[in-house]
Amino acid sequence: MIVSALLTSVGINLGLCVLFFVLYSILRKQPGNIKFYAPRLVAEGRARQRSEFNIESLLPSPGWVRKALEPSEEDLLASCGLDAVVFMRILIFSLRVFSVAAVVGICILLPVNYLGDQLRDIDFSDLPNKSLDLFSISNVKDGSNRLWFHFSAAYLITGVVCFLLYFEYKNISEKRLAYFNASKPQAHHFTVLVRDIPKHEGGSLSDTVERFFMEYYPSTYLSHVVVHRTNKLRGLITDAENLYRRLAHLKSRPATSQNNCCGSFLGLFQKKVDLAGHYAKKLEDLEENVRTEQLAREEVPAAFVCFKSRYGAATALHIRQSLKPTEWVTEEAPEPQDVYWPFFSTSFMQRWMSKVVVLVASVLLIVVFLIIVAFVQGLTYLDQLEIWLPFLKKVLTITVVSQVITGYLPSLILHFVSSYVPSIMKLFSTMQGYIAHSEIEKSACYKMLLFTIWILFFANVLTGSVTSQLQIILDPKNIPSRLAVVVPAQASFFIAYVVTSWTSLSSELTRMIPLIVDLITRNCSRCKSDELQIPSIRYHSEIPRLLAFGLLGLVYFILAPLILLFLLVFFCIGYIIYRNQLLNVYLPKYETGGRFWPIVHNSTIFSLILMHIIAIGIFGLKQLPLASSLILPLPVLTLLFNDYCRKRFLPIFQAYSAETLIRKDREDQNDPAKMAEFFDKLVTAYRDPSLMPINHFLNSNERTSPLLFSADG
Amino acid sequence: MIVSALLTSVGINLGLCVLFFVLYSILRKQPGNIKFYAPRLVAEGRARQRSEFNIESLLPSPGWVRKALEPSEEDLLASCGLDAVVFMRILIFSLRVFSVAAVVGICILLPVNYLGDQLRDIDFSDLPNKSLDLFSISNVKDGSNRLWFHFSAAYLITGVVCFLLYFEYKNISEKRLAYFNASKPQAHHFTVLVRDIPKHEGGSLSDTVERFFMEYYPSTYLSHVVVHRTNKLRGLITDAENLYRRLAHLKSRPATSQNNCCGSFLGLFQKKVDLAGHYAKKLEDLEENVRTEQLAREEVPAAFVCFKSRYGAATALHIRQSLKPTEWVTEEAPEPQDVYWPFFSTSFMQRWMSKVVVLVASVLLIVVFLIIVAFVQGLTYLDQLEIWLPFLKKVLTITVVSQVITGYLPSLILHFVSSYVPSIMKLFSTMQGYIAHSEIEKSACYKMLLFTIWILFFANVLTGSVTSQLQIILDPKNIPSRLAVVVPAQASFFIAYVVTSWTSLSSELTRMIPLIVDLITRNCSRCKSDELQIPSIRYHSEIPRLLAFGLLGLVYFILAPLILLFLLVFFCIGYIIYRNQLLNVYLPKYETGGRFWPIVHNSTIFSLILMHIIAIGIFGLKQLPLASSLILPLPVLTLLFNDYCRKRFLPIFQAYSAETLIRKDREDQNDPAKMAEFFDKLVTAYRDPSLMPINHFLNSNERTSPLLFSADG
């Protein structure tokens, strides 16, 4: 890619960004749109829909940026929870790292690269037609002493990253503890999930659980809730729910027909009454079915066991319970609203099988994706495209077209296709039988990260079929030199990719898809849908995306420092947008207490090691073997640092310590009345929502949250 | 190697075996030898030294074999502990596996191999000059359907091994639980080792520990013992101990000079008295030094914390104690007599450093060993030896010499050299900072296993320098075919190796080294040394040896089934000898409760997988690709089985369950008097022996056990 193509791409994307920003600032002020742009404020009663239209609202204004940046971290913590804060810390961490990296990269490495004359076509006059390779390490002469700048830069950035990582980890683990200490008694701290309860003849499962815990934990055991198989019931209830909604909608129409667009088909009125009767009959049948099914519910050998203290629950959790290690297996209980009920029915064998299925499916996904990537990859090289599609030759000679195609189109396609992957990964994780939404998203996060690194990096970089890629992996001693050859060559593609990502990030702001979907449904049914849908942030898609850009930045830091500028812009836009969305749009579905951070830490360590491996290769290629071997201590030191962090911080994210738990328990004992009330609630906190009386739901049609059968009712 | 060379080797070794057996049966009946052949019986007062000599004792008798085989497993458990039983189970397990394997191998595979005509020089008349390769899979024609026999055999033996492994694991884990349930209250079940205790200003370490556990475990905390740095003290005490012994020896001489050989140098009597005075003075100084050092002892931030119940100790062990994960780190306490006091002083950093040092040292050891192996390896090929040492040409033409050299010498050298490795490995493990003898030996066991597999198998098989070996490892996709080429070629070497091992095993019986050492010292000092030295079995050298033979057997089962016969003989001899030694010679130094078994299980699984990999390679080489791919499910199924066993049995070996502990605690509560007495003892159980009053030791010169400062005094 040449400089002018890059500039075209930057121009297009910057334009699109500004367009989205302007669009957002206008759209958000329009009447009726508040439910898209500030749904959680509406739900919390902190914002009201404006009905009157005024001309001023058509003028874009930057006030929302100020509002997004204004709240402090404490405000964010109070309103969005610790997970949101941790998410924002990823952006802050990245901004810090890449600010330092950009200063070093642009002020020192870029001039060094540009003034090297390896590529021997320096011509200061014609900058726009220069290849971007002139700004990369490829342009430095082989064996040149200038490479020691790059060498020092590698050490410097590793030091900076480790230093920042340490303090972030420390900071977040302190926040996690503070969050726990400040929290009110929460059901999941007092509860343990027990699986694989052995069957005893004579006596229900519930009796067995009661007997076991009364025997071994007489002083701390409180109560338990046996889990039931409710897959079928869940289906019936969804049907009933839909039917009820449709019926309510039908019934509401005649009454509102005077002042509503829907009342215009008066000729159809009679038909509607028939329909209503039919629906009511069907609904009654369904309700009956649900009640029968609720009575005939089948037990699953699992139970939520509640204890009288957090420490009591922790002892039951950490010590193996039964003589037989495969029985009475204890797990941490998720928050009640975080429980993913459908997958409670899976047995050990089923879970094992689904793991295998998921593995195979993931490999298939990668293969399919590789075909797409191979095509996209080809677009960056126009001549190759001309060979494939000769009829395009004429069109491609037009400068603008060729610049758009090489500079913009490939990354756009990649962005578009990869936007569907997170959902697929989440589906895969769901299949694996996790019992909590948070667990599913965390597992999907890891999957996405692996996928992103593999596809966007290895596959993109190590072009070729899956077999030839496997051969590279199976030949580990050549990996550094192989990477050193192919990674710098892909620099321009990734610069373009980062630039394109500005647009996809800004498009997040305007929430075009729900807006358009709403527009279509509103026009089709010709009736306002008043349901307020509050989305929650998709950590499993957003975190891997940020981390993948972090990986790109670190890997290309010494190879092609130009990328850092564009990355900084990306993270700045990201910081504003995500802050705005977290404060106005997303409602947290669960709270893991910052458990996503270890993923970030591990991924950053991986990026550093990959950078070191490539540095070893590149210094070898550039005929500076001394630098190549002097880099070797760097990965070792990094791994040592990681080892220390694993010992020092990771346990905090895995479980709370005895000290913390006992102190918190003692604090609670000072307020027996509050605790008595809490324990009353705790006993029913883990009831499967689908076992609630059916009327409970059908009569509460004001409820608009996606969790229609929430557990607290 | 040809058949006659093998027969020569078998002859020599069988002869040596019989010789050792005869020698043992005579020597053990000689007066004064009982302290070598039944020291633990003497120590336990179950056997007395016979002083009168009779002619009958010069006749060999097989009575000891019967006596060794007579006691049941319960008797063995009662007298030698669970570890000894587990050790014998390895032999029983191997005997079972290789009995099945031998039947299949000798009755089916061997004829199939022999009747294949790949090597095309079948001549039934001249069996002794046949190469052993005729009995191996190499002789089966490429692509022959007879290879399906080998294929089925691979499935069959995998099934048999997994079946037996499952039942052994089950059996031993049940034994472990039964052993725990039947045990009296033991100090280490009630104790937890706490490390990295933070320093608090104002207040000693002891106060800090007291305060912490009184605060968080008020109901179960009993007492604690802070650990001290006693390296220097330990040296002083050893000096004092030696001096005291020498002095006692000197003093005892004049009194016994009339009826003792030592009294003959009456002219030297005056000199001796002077020497005694000098020694006494020196001893006094040393005692003073010890007392000063004991007072000035330095604290180590570690303590043994005792609890009032096993469950109390388990909760403290399994739940992280402190806010900061690097402080108040809890570990399982070893048995009091199992504590390895010298290494308590190491810090986290020191332990990390010594790990690196040990790694480097291990690599060096392997390199040194490889040079030896390369030489030994050469001996199996006479022609190569002639090239190296041309002057030997004449000698080597003599048939017997060449047969001895090719059939016997290489394995003998290897046996001799490798007999020193376990001690080195134990030294390495000691350096790593383990806190218990049992931990050190377990770690040395793993190291030995890795070393043995690497050297005896990979290095021996994949001949060449370390670099070329690394290249093979770094090129994993060619491993199966590479192994398939070189492994069968080494069959004759390993058959010879197994045959030689008979001798080294039988030599274990006669305990020649202590016998000779005793003979020399007795003649030099011209005075009887009456100290009874009871050795303990060196698990870290014996277990890896047995497992290495198991590996050989499984790997060569389909390649060269001839080896199975010799292996069966090896395990039979081993069964008799080890049983005899465990019952008469070795005194257990510690009791891990069967924790060595998971090592055996893992090693056997590894052997199976290696066998599968080689089978994949060999079927590929033999042009039967269908068989090669049909083997693939076998390693997957084996790993699945292993996964199940890890879930089902391994936790039992890692920690006792709440159910077990609480039940046992409740049982104890029925006998409060016994428990009160036990708790009294518990408080001082973990006192560092070197902090005992110096007189305690010096006045108890009757004590002869190697644990001179035992904790129970």
Image (spheres, coloured by chain):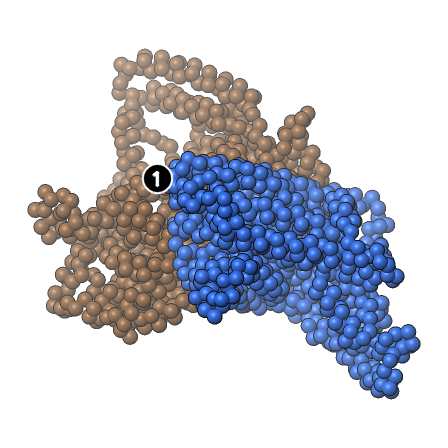
Chain colours: A blue, B brown
Instruction: Relative to B566, say whether A294 is above or below.
Output: below
- Which residue shows up at 42% across the image and 16% down it? B282
Q: Chain of mark 1?
A: B
Residue A665: image x %, image y %? 76, 46
Q: Residue furthest front?
A: A125
Residue B5: image x %, image y %? 17, 56
Q: Foreground residue, B120 or B403?
A: B120
The residue where tag 1 is placed is B364
Left or right: residue A569 compared with residue B611 = right
* Neighbours of disc 1 within 10 Å: few (<14), some (14-19), many (20+): few
Res. B195 image quadrant:
top right
Instruction: Relative to B240, say whether A325 is above or below.
Output: below
Instruction: Relative to A421, say whether B80 is above or below.
Output: above
Instruction: Check the picture and name the quadrant holding the C terminus of chain A.
Output: bottom right
- Which residue shows up at 74% across the image and 58% down it? A23
Res. A295 image quadrant:
bottom right
Q: Foreground residue, B400 or A239?
A: A239
Left or right: residue B465 compared with residue A234 = left
Left or right: residue B521 compared with residue A231 = left
Q: Foreground residue, A115 or A547?
A: A115
Amino acid type at circle 1 is Leu
Residue A691: image x %, image y %? 76, 70
Q: Is residue B575 visible?
A: no
Q: Foreground residue, B506 or A126?
A: A126
- Which residue shows up at 16% across the image and 49% down it? B384
Find numbered disc 1 in the image and state the secondary structure of the residue it sits on.
helix
Residue B299: image x %, image y %? 57, 28
Q: Is residue A67 visible?
A: yes
Instruction: Relative to B657, say whether B193 is above or below.
Output: above
